[in-house]
Image (cartoon, coloured by chain):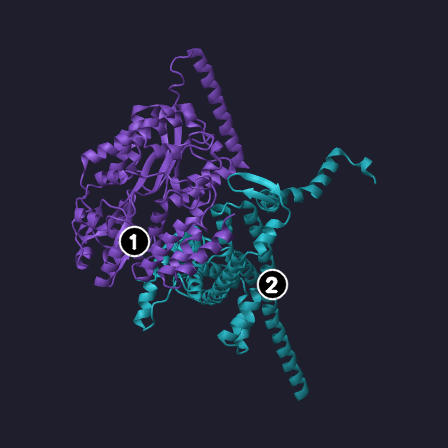
Amino acid sequence: MSSTTLTRRQRLSRLDVKASPYLYVAPFFVLFGLVGLFPLVYTFVVSLREWDLLKGPGEWVGLTNFANVLTDRFFWNSIGNTISIFFLSAVPQLIVALLLAAVLDQHLKAKTFWRMSVLLPYVVTPVAVTLIFTSIFNEADGLANNLLNLIGIADVQWKHDTLASHIAIATMVNWRWTGYNALILLAAMQAVPRDLYESAALDGAGAARRFFSVTIPSIRPTLIFVVITATIGGLQIFAEPRLFDVSNAGGIGGADRQFQTTVLYLWEMAFFRRDFGEAAAIAWLLFLLIVAFGLINFAISRRIATGEQRVESRRVRRALARKAGAR
Amino acid sequence: MRLSRRTAGAGAALATTASLALVLSGCAGDAGGGDSDEPITLTITTFGTFGYDDLYKQYEDEHPNITIEATNIDTGGNARTDAFTKIAAGSGLSDIVAIEEGWLGAIMEVSDQFEDLRDYGIEDRKGDWVDWKYAQATDPDGRVIGYGTDIGPEGICYNGAAFAAGGLPTDRAEVASLLEGDWAHFFEVGQQYHDATGKAWFDHSGFVWNAMVNQLDEGYYTKSGEVNVEDNAELKARFDLLAGAVAGGQSAAQAAWDWNGGKSFVDGTFATFVCPGWMLGVVQGNVEAGGGDASTGWDFADVFPGGAANWGGAFLSVPTTSEHKEAAAALASWLTEPDQQVAQFTAAGTFPSTIAAQEKLAADATPNAFFQGAPAGAILAERAQGVVAQFKGPDDSLIQENVFGPPLQALDRGETDAAGAWQQAIDLLHELVG
């Protein structure tokens, strides 16, 4: 330790090198601590107490709120609805977004026009989207039922039949998010080196083959990002089911809670039933669920992309072996 | 971060202004008694159609130092969420907050969050209001937390064309005498109508049930504040009566607040509709949205099954968080004076809660062109006779919406019978309340 030989200036500059990077990233963590971590911890504190929305905190009750929520059939109903709507939206949404991005990645005329067009639904607020779709899915005279009648299908009970209502809500979510995801995927596709495609084409790979063997593995990190954000968003659906049924003011999402998602159930608990403690417990359980789903999806999407590469290398190895054998 | 700093700055500025005002008023002595000319901005939050816009302008003209910043929330339900959230957060409420009768019960649990208006002289005006309106705004400790604005006496809206098709009289007075009686009689006539036309008598069960409950001396709660549903024989009898009518085909099973985009009001899907004063505007709006107009034939009769009933109405309150309590109370008091209530009725159709204003509307008997010239004000004044205030408990709107809503919709759809629907309601009550 020869620090005594250093001048004050030198010490400062050393400190600068060591500490500055942390200072540069600090704003994010300070902000995250304030608007991310603090609410998370505080919500947990609230979930441990009796807490009336208006009257404020009451007794400490330990994990009673969690126990109450976990034994509430409406909680499990909301979890089922959320997962059902999530699958009905996320899966088709990502497939279509991927195809859309692939199409936009071709040499089209008026590129910007097409790209802006797919983003347009995202610009419209979810409330407006829901109002329009609520009218489309009106059971008596809505556009959806009128079109179905044309091809001889009887009226669908969009707001009463459980699966139909999930499809209707998933449609709204897809309408809003498909274009957004397509653009993110498109940006990743544009970064794929073109010579990869060229050499693949020279080797006789068709368009579909190039898509599955070159494009998808190359955009893997972005694909994972899109899957994770779609998971987080999909499990937090609120505005669509809240506004889909105007008749039930209490936030129950359909007369028999056919499409009450977990966030909507949270809303009912906090603002209609005024039980803030249990609402906080729901929020935490939802958080855990999202983390779990996120991890599962992360694992799956990694596997899909790497699986493709593994198959690829196996094929190449086999081909080489055959060639070697022929020789 | 920046936001909080800015708020702190504003707070400091306010504190400065306040201390300055203190110094100034100290200099001026006691003249005016708080009636200073210091420019102030008052915020007010209302909901639905309140009809206050012209009144704000008038007040600002008469009080040049006052600027009114008004927010109107689309429905009472959303205003409830807004107010509850802000009470829970402990900040953000306007200087004047409109409270709806349906969730007044919950507000009463935290009535100390609102100013006792007796400190601002509301007792001098006690005689202005109908007794029960004033009593509703009084908490168990005797504090009065709201200036009554409107009330919701209920009459029957009916479609003349539909009545003619069903062989029923169409003249307003004849309809009133035809429907005079209890709910059993109302449903008897409804059954006749259904048998003659094959069509529904009323739009859906929820609103009818709401009226049947609101009319009782005690609703979901006893006067002492206990939930009383399960062993409430009167409630059960009314439920069975309604379920019988539904089983007879009298309900059109409509989705409330949608009514197929208003079209169901126009195409004769149902013949009657329960109408508190403020609902007249809703009916007109839906008929117009559905492509109809006055010729669609909706009329308003001076009758209500089972006697007088009230649905809704509002109060203006001053939260303790207000920076200008004195000025806010003065504005709220002025807005609820009889003259202003008459102006409010003209603008929005909300029926006044002060006796002088009711008498004025009864005397004027101005015909409402949309309702075939029915003198709506005079009819509502008649309908307001004999209304009694029902005690609304803290979970009243929860019981109405989330406990009875689902079983009534199941009844309307024919998915269950009276006994099944009642049991469903009781199960939901146990799960959701308490």
Chain A rendering hue:
cyan
Q: Secondary structure at mark 1?
A: helix
Chain B rendering hue:
purple
Q: Position of residue A253 (x, y in %)?
A: 44, 56
Placement of the N terminus of chain B among the 4 image quadrants:
top right
Q: Which residue is mark 2?
A: A296
Q: Secondary structure at mark 2?
A: helix
Identify residue type, mark 2: Ile
- Horizontal placement of B322 versus B4: left or right? left
Question: In this picture, is A60 found above or below B252?
Answer: above
Q: Which residue is mark 1?
A: B184
Query: Closer to us: mark 2 or mark 1?
Result: 1
Identify residue type, mark 1: Ala
Q: Chain of mark 1?
A: B
Say yes or no: labels 2 and 1 on the same chain.
no
Q: Are marks 2 and 1 in contact (CB under 8 Å)?
A: no
In the rendered image, is residue B255 in sight? Answer: no
Give the residue displayed 56% in from the left and 59% down from the top.
Answer: A228
The front one of A197 and B73 is: B73
- Horizontal placement of B326 versus B299: left or right? right
Q: Position of residue B337 (x, y in %)?
A: 30, 29
